[in-house]
Image (cartoon, rainbow, N blue to C red):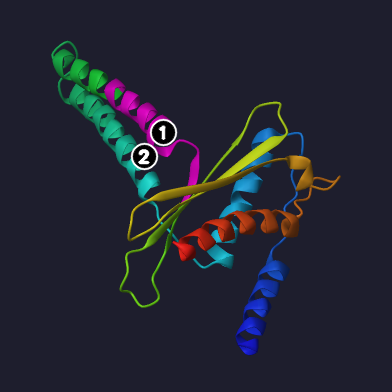
Amino acid sequence: MAAARNGKSGLLEKWRIDEKPVKIDKWDGAAVKNSLDDAAKKVLLEKFGYVENFCLVDGRLMICTVSCLFAMLALVWDYLHPFPESRPVLACCVISYFIMMGILTLYTSYKEKNIFLVALQKDPAGMDPDHVWQLSSSLKRFDDLYTLRVSFSDGNTKNWREAEFTKSVAVFFDESGTLVMDQFEKSVSKLHDTLAMEKKTK
């Protein structure tokens, strides 16, 4: 047991040492949010060893691909059958393109929301279904309060549980704009461990 703990500690120390400091313009809200999101993603993928799932991104890419196909069809058809002969096809393609853009808006607003990571926790024995972890965040414009939400879905029951924190970004960055990874890692790990503990007790 001691050897296992030492081995795990060694891995965590190596993970911290290998991590290059992230330095950003602390007055740039988008850069601040993106750097914190990337760091939270690294905690789940590199520290806990979960596998990233790209289902949400794939769905968005599929919608964009279909939209581009309509646009390409309109261009090719207009080349082969110059206007006004191509008018009906162009009209259908334009309408279809804007419909797909509407679908994309609904998808990003109600399906993706603010989720930036979907990760799978594989069963080592390969017997039980994968547990699903999601990370989502928000940082309002001209605001310093960063909210990180960790969501967990049990592979067996399919029930969702959530935990979140809201803290000032000043807690995680020093005066020069460098991310204090140890401090941020502790906050993310605490949310993760809270949900993992609930999973074991139920």
Residue found 71% across the figure and 29% down from its top: 143
Q: Earlier in the sequence, mark 1 or mark 2?
A: 2
Chain part drawn in magenta: 98-117
What secondary structure characterizes most of the magenta part? helix
Where is mark 2, residue-wise? 60
Coordinates of residue 196 in the picture (x, y in percent): 52, 61
Horizontally, residue 158 falls left or right of residue 141, namely left
Mark 2 closeness class: few <14, some 14–19, many ≥20 residues within 10 Å = some
Q: Which element type, helix, strand or loop, lies under badge 2?
A: helix
Is 106 drawn above or below residue 133 in the view shown? above
Residue found 55% across the figure and 47% down from its top: 163
Type of residue at label 1?
Thr
Q: Does the magenta stretch include residue 176?
A: no
Horizontally, residue 102 falls left or right of residue 70, namely right
Is 180 drawn above or below residue 6 in the view shown? above
Residue found 76% across the figure and 34% down from its top: 27
Quarter of the image for residue 83 reads: top left
Q: Nearer the viewer, mark 1 or mark 2?
A: 1
Horizontally, residue 134 falls left or right of residue 97, namely right
Is 1 drawn above or below residue 188 in the view shown? below
Q: What number is the disc on residue 108?
A: 1
